[in-house]
Image (cartoon, rainbow, N blue to C red):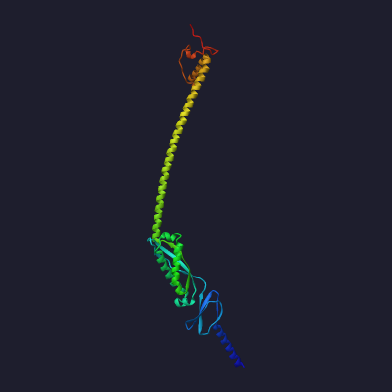
Amino acid sequence: MSRTLAIIGVLVILGGIAASQALFVVDQTKQALVLRFGEVRRTVKDPGLNVKIPFIENTVYYEKRALDVDAPSEEMILSDQKRLVVDSYARYRIIEPLAFFKAVRTERAAASRLSVIITSSLRRVLGNQTLFDVLSEKRAVIMANIKREVNDEAQRFGIEIIEVRIRRADYPSAIRENIYNRMKSEREREAREFRAQGNEQAQKIRADADKQRVVLVAEAQKQAETLRGEGDSQAIKIYADAFGKDPEFFAFYRSMQAYRNALGGGDTTMVLSPSSDFFEFFNSMEGSPSVPSQ
């Protein structure tokens, strides 16, 4: 009895191993090839549970989803002899697993082959374009042509190219440095030119301001002298009119001014005759001029 149970247990184990080897699952993101002694027997693209001959057939899985490949940066010469370092990438999908298996077998080998194809296509297409074309709206047409060429080459690998893009296009380091120095020199030249023009304008404005200042000062001085002359004339007229009405008061006022000017210092010594005209108002208590003696 125990021997029978052992045999049954062994058979169950062998059956489980055989079942595990006979059954395989294809995920919805995958597609599979069933190989018998290295030869492809069938392709399984639909997801689900499948059966194969255990220990004789094996499976190889490939992605259904889009895959990326980064082409190495390459220096390329455009039709106008400009040099660019182009960094590109592509996205592709495996649509024929059988052809893919026969051509490249692995995704790493496919990426290597596609990198060469992309670089060759870039050199061929960009070699007929100018730098202006690459940087203008024409770039979309250029990339469409590159994608078509790469796709034509990739179809024999069972691959469909989704897109090819230039990630970056720049001048080589040496040329970039020369361009930078040239642009810097040009900006410095323009700065010097603008500065010289600014100085010229400043000198013109300053000279015009100085001229206007001189004119304004001269006009103001002229007007001041005119007003001062008119004022002096009016003052003289007023004094003349006032003194003409009372000549005696005018004589008295002028004598008082002369006394103040002559005697106001305090240290002035004068030797004059008391009967001189200068002291005519000193001989009268009323301030009237004295009558000269006969």
Q: In which quarter of the image is the N terminus?
A: bottom right
Against 166, residue 184 (above or below) is above
Residue 109 in sight in this render: no
Q: Indicate the position of residue 13 as horizontal and vertical percent values.
A: 57, 86
Against 205, residue 219 (above or below) is above
Residue shown at 42%/40% (left/top)? 204
Q: How many marks?
A: 0
Q: Indicate the position of residue 196 as horizontal and vertical percent values.
A: 40, 45
Task: Tell me: 131 left or right of 60.
Answer: left
Residue 141 in sight in this render: yes
Q: Which residue lies furthest to the left in this view?
A: 81
Against 109, residue 221 (above or below) is above
Q: Indicate the position of residue 60 as horizontal and vertical percent values.
A: 50, 78
Q: Indicate the position of residue 26 as horizontal and vertical percent values.
A: 54, 77
Residue shown at 40%/52% (left/top)? 186
Q: Which of 184 and 294 is in front in this view?
A: 184
Q: Nearer the viewer, residue 131 or 180?
A: 131
